[in-house]
């Protein structure tokens, strides 16, 4: 079977994922690009004796890459082996998307242009002339609507056709003055054995004119570098003077924009000007007075649904894992293996997985806001509000991403070009409660608040964290980062009905990653916690209690003695000793040694707080009729201590993975040190303040 490797490339929000998900017979594989945390999607299709592998690159606006995702996409395009490029563009923003298309065409690879969302243009009375586009560009063009499954399967047929044909001649040429300078550079590049291919030499020359640092590094160690360097300096000066621009990169950007505009005029029949659904919705949703309350209502509704709907399957999952634990106890002989599985791993992993419905609903809500186009409006809407706190409107995107996971949120902050704006945003991102904290909140809310108020309490927690983050941002801007944030610039996409298949695929990916984490990292952490809580074994203590238990006939007294034994064994274990050692630090917050240990283990991953509490409070005492962990929490933790724990979880440092990402993104040691200390000190002070205040009111 012949293999064809294809790269799917395009700017963000052009519907690449929807096109991939709409392809018939496609098998999706999800992982990460080598050495980075950026998600990698690969699609495999078998047809007519070919196995086609499609690598779906992250969205990239330009080969002048800035964000980690763009850097990954650019590196793949430059360095990996593949047979052709499928460039996907949005028919609604064709001229803007074609600027990147021209950069891809400069690479002189076999290429197909897919014009997606054609249905939206047609519904407004417009049309795209496919033949004219093919004639002007010199590459095959396919018109698609992933939502309506139009033209999508034609992509695979066209890939096989283009693969077997010779590469077409280049049809993309720039202004004569630019072409003249490209030719000069090509002649020098041909002197090196690395650039004998005229197509590759032309691409290198264009990227040098575009001041591409990655290309500059490639030629830096070649013998021709000195000659090329001198020529480049001269060419830069000549072109910048002739075109009256600051850099040759600006000149090429203007050229591509002019070419795209001219091409669209010939190939796109624009719809007549009329008031669209987007215009009508925007009048309400980004209204200067009503817009913010509407946004807050949507967020409140999301948290209500997250709690109310997500709580329905929680009891089923809890009961299932309890049954698994009881079955293991019945099947396996007594001993360490039975204990670690039935009392350690299964209850701990189950206590985390039971919150999977809540997390998926939260992700679904955030994805819906993004896919419909409302998230960009929310950023625009909040720009003026956020400026009052020293943040740029664009910072809203990484801040909202922080509600999902802090790791990509830190990376998303790279889109903020101003270093001050970027560092301030990253320093307050930890206050946006990530999905990993949700199980802890749901557990504590379920234990200490009426179920009728659960959604409201969850909303208050999330909003309180966000408000605190804004206040801290204002303090940082006033004290440490004086100056105004950059002005807000963002394109508003049209409102779209979300692709149900794309939503389903995204949720499946999130669920798989969460379950993988629960089955590996959390299971491993649970084993460590079980070991520390089970050893050293005090045989004398166990024997004395077993004698007492055997002598008692009353079942209630026997259960009470068993609980006393379990408590004393825990206190004498390694974990008990650790907990006793750190207990004085948390005693002013009303925490016992178990909660103190859970708080510390939460620095590894917030979900581990729940599994730690499950191990320390619910060992060997769970059944399908009651939530033992909640009952144990009510017995051992006061209301004010529970609120203090919520405050700690809301404010203190995120997980190790997030902290590592911050260190990777921020090279300054001063900010690294500040980042490690200030949220934990602030969390303790805030928790102590809340605990004392509630105590003063008699709670």
Image (spheres, helix red, strand yellow):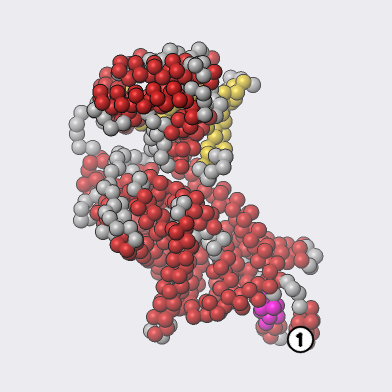
Q: Is residue 560 above or below residue 615?
A: below
**Front residue of this view, candidates 362 and 588:** 588
- Judging by the rendered image, the residue that carries numbered circle 1 is 548
Residue 614: image location, x then y, percent: 60, 68
Q: Is residue 483 above or below residue 16?
A: below
**Front residue of this view, candidates 117 and 590:** 590
Would you say residue 422 sits in the magenta stretch?
no
Prevalent SS, magenta region: helix
Residue 284: image location, x then y, percent: 23, 49
Asked if one can make out residue 321 in the rendered structure from this viewpoint, the answer is no
What residue appears at the point 42 percent right and 42 percent down from the top-left corner?
Answer: 67
Quarter that holds the N terminus: top right
What residue appears at the point 34 percent right and 48 percent down from the top-left corner?
Answer: 418
Which image quadrant is residue 569 in? bottom right
Residue 294: image location, x then y, percent: 28, 55
What residue appears at the point 29 percent right and 58 percent down from the top-left corner?
Answer: 482
Say what secondary structure mark 1 lies in: helix
Residue 129: image location, x then y, percent: 32, 19
Q: Residues within 10 Å of mark 1 (few under 14, many from 20)?
A: few
Question: In the visual, does 225 lie left or right of 127?
Answer: right
Which image quadrant is residue 432 in? bottom left
Give the magenta part as a residue range: 564-572
Question: In the visual, does 129 lie left or right of 19?
Answer: left
Would you say residue 570 sits in the magenta stretch?
yes
Question: In the visual, does 129 lie left or right of 429?
Answer: left
């Amino acid at each position: 079977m012949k293999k064809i490797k294809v790269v799917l490339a395009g700017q963000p929000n052009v519907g690449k994922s929807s096109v991939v998900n709409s392809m018939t017979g496609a098998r999706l594989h999800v992982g990460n690009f080598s050495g980075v945390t950026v998600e990698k999607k690969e699609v495999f299709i078998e047809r007519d004796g070919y196995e086609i592998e499609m690598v779906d690159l992250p969205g990239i606006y330009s080969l002048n890459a800035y964000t980690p995702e763009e850097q990954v996409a650019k590196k793949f395009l430059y360095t990996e082996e593949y047979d052709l490029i499928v460039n996907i563009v949005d028919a609604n923003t064709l001229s803007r998307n074609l600027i990147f298309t021209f950069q891809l065409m400069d690479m002189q690879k076999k290429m197909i242009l897919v014009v997606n969302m054609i249905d939206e243009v047609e519904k407004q009375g417009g049309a795209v002339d496919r033949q004219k586009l093919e004639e002007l560009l010199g590459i095959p063009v396919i018109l698609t609507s992933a939502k309506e499954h139009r033209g999508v399967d034609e992509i695979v047929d066209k890939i096989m056709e283009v693969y077997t044909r010779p590469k077409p001649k280049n049809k993309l040429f720039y202004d004569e003055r630019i072409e003249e300078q490209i030719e000069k550079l090509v002649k020098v590049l041909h002197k090196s054995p690395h650039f004998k291919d005229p197509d590759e030499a032309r691409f290198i020359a264009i990227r040098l004119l575009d001041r591409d640092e990655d290309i500059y590094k490639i030629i830096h160690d070649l013998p021709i570098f000195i000659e090329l360097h001198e020529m480049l300096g001269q060419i830069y000066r000549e072109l910048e003077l002739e075109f009256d621009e600051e850099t040759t990169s600006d000149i090429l950007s203007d050229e591509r924009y002019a070419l795209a505009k001219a091409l669209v005029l010939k190939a796109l029949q624009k719809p007549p000007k009329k008031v669209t659904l987007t215009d009508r919705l925007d009048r309400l949703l980004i209204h200067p007075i009503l817009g913010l309350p509407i946004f807050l209502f949507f967020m409140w509704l999301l948290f209500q649904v997250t709690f109310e709907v997500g709580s329905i399957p929680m009891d089923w999952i809890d009961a299932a894992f309890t049954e698994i634990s009881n079955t293991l106890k019945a099947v396996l002989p007594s001993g360490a293996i039975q204990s670690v599985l039935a009392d350690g791993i299964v209850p701990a992993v189950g206590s985390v997985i039971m919150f999977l419905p809540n997390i998926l609903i939260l992700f679904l809500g955030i994805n819906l806001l993004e896919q419909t186009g409302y998230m960009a409006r929310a950023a625009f809407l909040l720009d003026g509000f956020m400026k009052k706190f020293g943040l740029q409107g664009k910072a809203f995107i990484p801040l909202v991403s922080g509600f999902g996971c802090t790791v990509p949120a830190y990376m998303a902050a790279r889109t903020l070009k101003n270093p001050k704006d970027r560092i301030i945003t990253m320093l307050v991102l930890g206050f946006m409660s990530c999905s990993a904290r949700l199980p802890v909140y749901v557990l504590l809310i379920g234990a200490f608040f009426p179920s009728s108020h659960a959604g409201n309490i969850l909303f208050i927690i999330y909003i309180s964290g966000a408000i605190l983050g804004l206040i801290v941002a204002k303090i940082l801007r006033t004290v440490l980062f004086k100056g105004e944030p950059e002005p807000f610039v963002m394109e508003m996409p049209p409102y779209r009905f979300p692709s149900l298949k794309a939503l389903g695929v995204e949720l499946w990916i999130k669920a798989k990653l969460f379950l993988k984490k629960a089955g590996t990292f959390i299971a491993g952490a649970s084993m460590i916690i079980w070991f520390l809580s089970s050893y050293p074994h005090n045989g004398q203590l166990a024997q004395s209690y077993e004698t007492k238990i055997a002598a008692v006939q009353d079942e209630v007294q026997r259960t009470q003695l068993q609980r006393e034994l379990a408590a004393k064994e825990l206190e004498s274990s390694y974990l008990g000793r650790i907990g006793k050692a750190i207990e004085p630090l948390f005693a002013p917050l009303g925490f016992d040694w178990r909660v103190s240990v859970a708080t510390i283990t939460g620095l590894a991953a917030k979900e581990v707080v729940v599994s730690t509490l499950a191990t320390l409070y619910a060992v060997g005492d769970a059944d399908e009729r009651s939530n033992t962990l909640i009952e144990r929490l009510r017995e051992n933790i006061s209301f004010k201590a529970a609120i203090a724990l919520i405050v700690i979880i809301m404010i203190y440092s995120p997980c190790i993975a997030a902290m590592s990402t911050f260190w990777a993104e921020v090279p300054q040691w001063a900010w690294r040190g500040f980042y490690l200390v200030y949220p934990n000190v602030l969390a303790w002070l805030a928790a102590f303040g809340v605990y004392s205040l509630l105590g003063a009111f008699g709670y």
